[in-house]
Image: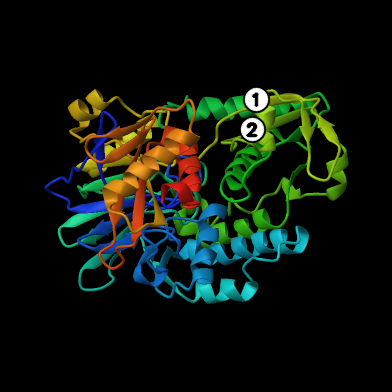
Amino acid sequence: MKPTHCSATFKEGREEEKKPTHCQGYLLALGQTEPEGRTPPTCCFNNRTNTTRNQNQRNHNQEPLENHAKLPQTHWNQNQQLTEERREMVGYDGPIYMTHPTKAICPILLEDFRKITVDKKGETNFFTSQMIKDCMKKVVPLNLHQTVQVDDELEIKAYYAGHVLGAAMVQIKVGSESVVYTGDYNMTPDRHLGAAWIDKCRPDVLISESTYATTIRDSKRCRERDFLKKVHESIERGGKVLIPVFALGRAQELCILLETFWERMNLKAPIYFSTGLTEKANHYYKLFITWTNQKIRKTFVQRNMFEFKHIKAFDRSYADNPGPMVIMPGYCVQGTIGHKILNGQRKLELEGRSTLEVKLQVEYMSFSAHADAKGIMQLIRMAEPRNVLLVHGEASLKLVSSEQALKDLGLNEHQLRFTCRVQLQDQSPEQETLSRVYTHLRSVLKGFSVQLLPDGTVMVESILIKVSSSPEDPDSKTLLLSWSYQDEDLGSFLSSLLKKGLPAALC
């Protein structure tokens, strides 16, 4: 995970400090904020640092983790829960705030992943079951719409986010300044959860996910009808349907949809779901029924929608009898088998197995529980923030144009850049160190544009490099490398190159 810092606005490739008068804080992105499932930003108000989900001991100027003390968690999934164990492993000793369902599901998810990684794959440098227990002892449960006064200055409040059971958007306030971090959310109710909701809290910054920022989904009813039609047609032909789906959230959504359809059509074909996580998740959906949508809550006394009549635990012998269709009901991360199949690849190299040839019909139908472009705009209008930061999406995709954001929503435009710090031992003045860095990069980076600018920076393509000294240690210099997301590869290469130090001939 790369240490990154985003606290300035850049114009024409040059840094310009821009601090809005209404919010004298900054955002610290602990890792990449664009791709699905990556690390979210940390918020700093008046020298008070608070993180919404993740913190890493090697980040933020090498400050120890214990200095960052209040950690609300928006929801559970594998990436989010693993950050809890990182905290435990690096010595974090402060409270961790979670909603009640998240607190219940989190240790099960962690233990499941630990067993797969340690028991099945043989990983040794990993967290233990005891670490999971120690981590969960730090958890403070959080109720929806409850304002929690963490200390004299800091307060937090959770809002319903839909998405998965227990998911919450978090408002963080320090004095008169505030940030809302959405985590993942869904503005459209589905078959088992309600829609996300937030009041007109007018935060200084709204940090919103943007997984589907440029997508406007078609009618949910049409999607469901098309899905059921394809499944039914395949079964009528004597075929089988395999539906790869997240065990928590989408599994319950599609189980309810199929269960209802099977009941209405009086179908007899068996439906199987994988045991383990899905089975355990169903238990917690029953336990936290008040988090589900209005229809399920109303009919709960007469019938629990999570007690499936037509859906049974998976029979392992079924695995060797593949069917003619695979339906992918959501986002597939680049590089995964699902992503490769969706992109037309028909020969797959599987770990520990021979090449697998894909001989089946493939359909993609979005049942993802993320907000689309309309949903994101709806939330922005609900909360009325002064500034919006979009994370958890792809950098090349834009929700709206800058002009539209300024005109329709009254938002400020900021271009986010990432900064990596590299330490050098050099007794020379800053300008001489910078000159040596420039000479070194000119000699190494053939074919790249390397410039020494009048303002005391080196520019490699669009990447800026500055030198600063430490008052405590004049012999130590800090190189600050700044890049935008699309230059991530070159920025990472330069930071690795400079960490090796300057050649002796230049020192």
Q: Position of residue 18 (x, y in %)?
A: 18, 42
The answer to whether 371 appears left or right of 304 in the picture is: left
Residue beneath the point at 50% across and 70% down: 90
- Of 351 and 114, the residue lying toward us: 351
Q: Is residue 110 above or below residue 36?
A: below
Q: Residue at x 21, y 50 (%)?
A: 201
Residue 417 visible from this viewpoint = yes
Toward the viewer: 140 or 301?
140
Query: Looking at the picture, how far across and down is residue 182, in whole percent?
Result: 36, 48
Q: Which residue is mark 2?
A: 339
Task: Give the x, y percent position of residue 226.
Answer: 60, 24
Question: Circle 2 sits in a helix, a strand or a loop, which is it?
Answer: helix
Could you tell whether 372 is left or right of 471 in the image? right
The colouring scheme, among rainbow, by chain, secondary structure or one colour, is: rainbow
Residue at far front of view: 505
244 vs 501: above or below: above
Q: Residues within 10 Å of mark 1 (few under 14, many from 20)?
A: few
Q: Are marks 1 and 2 in contact (CB under 8 Å)?
A: yes
Amino acid type, residue under disc 1 in the picture:
Asn
Given residues 99 and 496, the one toward you in this image is: 496
Residue furthest to the left: 21
Q: Amino acid at mark 2?
A: His
- How many angstroms separate mark 1 from mark 2 (CA)? 6 Å
Against 12, is 66 above or below? below
- Foreground residue among 267 and 6: 6
Q: Find disc 1 in the rendering and name its residue.
A: 343
